């Protein structure tokens, strides 16, 4: 490398990695390791474990809901299960697994050796098992876990029926607050890394879209999470120490909490979906063998979504007594989000158009995810219009809508990313056959599970019920069958992950003939990626079919991979 | 719309129909492609039109003046959404059928990096569509005008004083409750006036009830964990909501404990009931029948059981019901939550922690759990 100034601090190259020895030293995954690639796999593995926990809770719920009366579990138990299902899936599965991908992908994609603050990174990760244990421990305390929904609206969440100081709701708020702090630490790290540590020549508009969307998502974390965390602390004080921020008897207002909560928790969906938009934008060019259509606009649209996402939260409160003018303002801002997201969807479709599609498992999950997202976007517009929301808000229509987003789009995108990048970071190939079985079961299961929910909601079935009127029975039987099918779909997936990692075929450096800095590294990449030999980027990403190299001296990097 | 149509014609060379793979013809518009796209758009329009006609089959009967307005807006969105989904699906299906690489073909596709005209099109068209939809929704919202004012109060006791209802189970007498710091407690006039009106002789029509041309109400809706109570201006208390058809009614919504929502799917209307606020709400039933009224904002252990019925009936039937109700004595209304709670006590109070149900409301007309509802 030359002596020209490079945009990252060379001292980070000497950041200590206390347990060296990848790839054979598995103990490093159980230590306070500061290597972003170790932390990434720690996040993903633990998050997948919690996916199983959350999925198990979901299947007990669907077992309860397969018949109209509450006959499998007591209604109070059902309420705890659905509260914990939502909390586990959001705070212990999706946020952590996406942080795992941030850790794995951001440094190699921009040519950085590691994150900007490796110790902070490890600290942020190790808070995850802490709040995971706190949340799981709430199943064991007297009275059971929190059961006021993942919104935890007061005054219900502050009723504290047993009057104990340590109760399920207390632990729930504590876990959410720790999770918030962890995510803020992570966001500081990801933003700094992307802004300060890009390889020479990698200007903003030569950056892969995943880095754009990760930066956009982490900006939301920095703007919104302090608000939620503050709301959670106030709620904790109301619950445990007798304050009345949200209690009308003491002059407080429960509406205030709803503002705190949704100011972050609606944008939170974009924190999860933006990186998945990044996955789609990375994966389609590779398997369609074409440049990403409209790269610049797709990149900028991410920040259009960030801006709008911060001014839409009241659409969750259309019937909370919100005045008419305010409903209209927030309806318009919410509907405007369709424009930047539409730009992205159309750009992906145009990327597929006249490509040379390789229908790998990653590609199937990405295409399936975009298809589902288009459907979810349409129902999202319906929910944004006040008169329709007045009818279907708080019904199963909403449950169907956001599961189509959270599962059928975001989790599909996560699966696509796992199938796409597993080889790069483990050095082993996943079995495509099992992957395709996983895809078919998941796609069919998701439609069967979530489509009938829309119908139940239109007929008026409220969300969060443990029992329901008989007219909703058919929709619920279908949904339950779909949920069990999704449970079955986990079997080939887990089998694939475990057996491939243990004894799968060795992965070449670039199994998909993909373009990107991470594919110029061996599989798995060494601890500090390019170390002192950071390539100079000379063209934009996704140069499929354009015939120009991505970095200076590309032949040298490729030759080195062949030697290795 | 722009998805299938403009992608085909806008990105230069267009597919030749029937050739089995995208054509590699020269620049310019291929007549075959234009025909194919026109045919596709026509079919998508027909399919969307058909789906819009299916909308009433997915929904409960239309039992209020709001329902047709909401349904028409929803059907419009179903139509636009269906067209969009079909367009995008057509593109995905086309690429799956005709743009797959052969097994050993590792070549790259055509390096199309963008198309400014196309990108402007698919930015402007959605922008215009959502703004038009929003304008239509604002118009519909203005016609509904169901939400009235909101008065902040410090707790349930003060809310009950404000709406002039006393003797609510669990809230004995208006004057005996603790005196809060607010000004309402020193002004018992509203409550007294209301009580006076309710103690009028049972003959002549009471204000707010009798005159069939005027607005009915205010009917005070009291939500609690986990039952509903409706107090009419003449003092009748009921666990079912009886309303005369085609007559506007005004509600005042009060919660005794946590957040609830009054949701009547057949009316297409829902309003949260917020502790610490008294909220005014208006609607006009338009179809006789018995419909479900559900709590749709999670309110704790027996939330799912917190439902009752709305009975919309002719003016005469409503008047007969009212007179009969006035003659019936007040009695606690049985409800599902109380029953489930006592079953739980018999089983040794197993389950996760919950507050016990509030005392059931004392009403002239209890809930009829056997009656069949329509939606």
Image (tube, coloured by chain):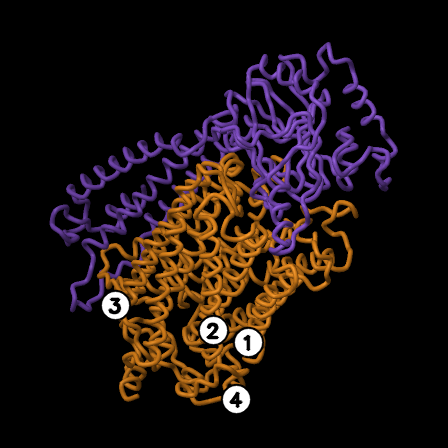
SS at mark 2 in the image: helix
Q: Which residue is mark 4?
A: A18
Which residue corresponds to the image point at 25% horizontal and 70% vertical from the top-left? Answer: A547
Q: CA distance from mark 1 to mark 2?
A: 9 Å
On screen, residue A160 above or below B269:
below
In the image, residue A15 lies at what x, y percent?
Answer: 53, 86
- Count of numbered circles on the image: 4
| Badge 1: chain ID | A
Q: Is residue A332 visible?
A: no
For chain B, what colour was chosen? purple
Q: Which residue is mark 1?
A: A121
SS at mark 1 in the image: helix
Tell me whether the residue at label 3 lies in contact with that at label 2, contact meaning CB atoms closer than 8 angstroms.
no
Which mark is drawn over residue A103? 2
- Which chain did the renderer colour orange? A
For residue B11, side relative to residue A501 (left or right): left
Closer to the observer: label 3 or label 2?
3
Q: In the image shown, does B157 or A524 lie closer to the viewer?
A: B157
Q: CA distance from mark 2 to mark 4?
A: 18 Å
């Amino acid at each position: 490398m030359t002596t020209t100034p490079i945009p990252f601090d060379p001292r980070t190259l000497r950041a200590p990695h206390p347990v060296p020895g990848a790839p054979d030293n598995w103990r490093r995954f159980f230590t306070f390791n500061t290597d972003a690639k170790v932390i990434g796999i720690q996040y993903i593995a633990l998050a997948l474990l919690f996916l199983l926990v959350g999925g198990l809770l979901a299947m007990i719920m669907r077992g309860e809901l397969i018949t109209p009366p509450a006959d499998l579990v007591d209604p109070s138990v059902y309420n705890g299960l659905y509260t914990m299902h939502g909390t586990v899936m959001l705070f212990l599965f999706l946020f952590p697994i996406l942080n795992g991908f941030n850790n794995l992908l951001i440094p190699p994609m921009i040519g950085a050796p590691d994150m900007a603050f490796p110790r902070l990174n490890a600290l942020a990760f190790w808070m995850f098992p802490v709040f995971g244990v706190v949340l799981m421990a709430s199943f064991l305390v007297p009275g059971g876990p929190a059961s006021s929904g993942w919104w935890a609206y007061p005054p219900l969440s502050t009723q504290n029926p047993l009057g104990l100081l340590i109760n399920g709701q207390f632990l729930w708020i504590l876990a959410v607050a720790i999770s918030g702090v962890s995510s803020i630490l992570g966001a500081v790290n990801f933003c700094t890394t992307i802004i300060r540590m890009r390889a020479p020549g990698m200007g903003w508009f030569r950056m892969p879209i995943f880095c754009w969307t990760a930066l956009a998502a982490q900006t939301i974390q920095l703007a919104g999470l302090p608000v939620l965390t503050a709301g959670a602390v106030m709620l904790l004080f109301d619950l445990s120490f007798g304050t009345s921020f949200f209690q009308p008897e003491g002059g407080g207002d429960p509406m205030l909490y709803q503002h705190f909560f949704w100011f972050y928790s609606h944008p939170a969906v974009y924190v999860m979906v933006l990186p998945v938009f990044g996955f789609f934008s990375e994966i389609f060019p590779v398997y369609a063998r074409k440049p990403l259509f409209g790269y610049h606009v797709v990149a900028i649209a991410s920040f259009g979504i960030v801006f709008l996402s911060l001014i839409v939260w009241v659409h969750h409160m259309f019937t909370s007594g919100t005045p008419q003018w305010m409903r209209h303002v927030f309806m318009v801002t919410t509907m405007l989000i369709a424009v930047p997201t539409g730009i992205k969807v159309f750009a992906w479709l145009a990327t597929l158009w006249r490509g040379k599609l390789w229908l790998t498992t990653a590609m199937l999950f990405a295409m399936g995810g975009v298809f589902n997202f288009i459907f979810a976007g349409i129902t999202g517009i319906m929910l944004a219009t006040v008169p329709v929301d007045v009818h279907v808000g708080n019904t199963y229509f909403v449950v169907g809508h956001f599961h189509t987003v959270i599962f059928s789009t975001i989790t599909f995108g996560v699966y696509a990313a796992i199938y796409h990048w597993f080889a790069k970071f483990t050095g082993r190939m996943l079995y495509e056959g099992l992957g395709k079985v996983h895809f078919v079961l998941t796609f069919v299961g998701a439609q069967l599970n979530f489509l009938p929910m829309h119908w139940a909601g239109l007929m008026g079935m409220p969300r969060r019920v443990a029992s329901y009127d008989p007219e909703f029975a058919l929709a619920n039987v279908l949904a339950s069958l779909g949920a069990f099918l999704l449970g079955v779909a986990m079997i080939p997936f887990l089998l694939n992950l475990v057996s491939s990692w243990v004894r799968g075929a060795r992965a070449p450096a670039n199994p998909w003939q993909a373009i990107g800095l991470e594919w110029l590294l061996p599989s798995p990449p060494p601890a500090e990626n390019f170390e002192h030999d950071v390539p100079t980027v000379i063209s934009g990403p996704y140069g499929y079919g354009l015939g120009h190299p991505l970095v200076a001296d590309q032949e040298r990097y490729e030759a080195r991979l062949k030697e290795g | 719309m722009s998805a299938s149509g403009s992608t085909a014609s806008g990105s230069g060379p267009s597919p030749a129909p029937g050739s089995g793979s995208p054509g590699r013809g020269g620049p310019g518009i291929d007549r075959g492609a234009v025909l194919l796209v026109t045919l596709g758009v026509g079919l998508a329009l027909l399919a969307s039109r058909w789906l819009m006609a299916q909308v009433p089959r997915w929904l409960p009967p239309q039992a209020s003046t709001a329902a047709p307005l909401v349904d028409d807006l929803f059907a419009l969105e179903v139509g636009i959404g269906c067209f969009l989904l079909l367009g995008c699906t057509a593109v995905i299906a086309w690429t799956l059928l005709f743009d797959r690489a052969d097994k050993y073909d590792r070549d790259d596709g055509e390096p199309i990096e963008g198309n400014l005209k196309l990108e402007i099109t698919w930015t402007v068209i959605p922008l215009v569509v959502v703004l038009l939809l929003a304008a239509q929704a604002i118009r519909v919202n203005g016609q509904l005008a169901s939400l009235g004012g909101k008065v902040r109060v410090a707790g349930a006791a003060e809310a009950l004083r404000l709406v002039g209802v006393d003797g609510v189970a669990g809230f004995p007498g208006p004057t005996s409750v603790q005196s809060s710091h607010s000004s309402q407690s020193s002004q018992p006039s509203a409550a007294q006036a209301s009580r006076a009106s309710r103690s009028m002789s049972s003959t002549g029509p009471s204000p707010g009830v009798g005159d069939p041309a005027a607005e009915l109400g205010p009917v005070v809706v009291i939500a609690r964990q986990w039952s509903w109570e409706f107090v009419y201006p003449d003092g009748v208390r009921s666990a079912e909501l009886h309303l005369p058809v085609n007559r506007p009614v005004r509600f005042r919504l009060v919660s005794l404990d946590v957040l609830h929502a009054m949701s009547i799917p057949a009316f297409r209307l829902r309003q949260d009931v917020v502790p610490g606020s008294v909220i005014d709400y208006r609607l006009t039933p338009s179809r006789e029948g018995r419909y479900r009224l559900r709590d749709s904002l999670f309110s704790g252990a027996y939330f799912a059981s917190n439902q009752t019925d709305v009975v919309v009936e002719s003016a005469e039937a409503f008047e007969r019901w009212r007179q009969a109700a006035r003659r019936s004595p007040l009695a606690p209304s049985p409800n599902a939550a109380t029953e489930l709670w006592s079953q739980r006590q018999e089983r040794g109070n197993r389950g996760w922690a919950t507050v016990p149900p509030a005392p059931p409301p004392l009403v002239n007309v209890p809930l009829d759990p056997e009656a069949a509802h329509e939606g």
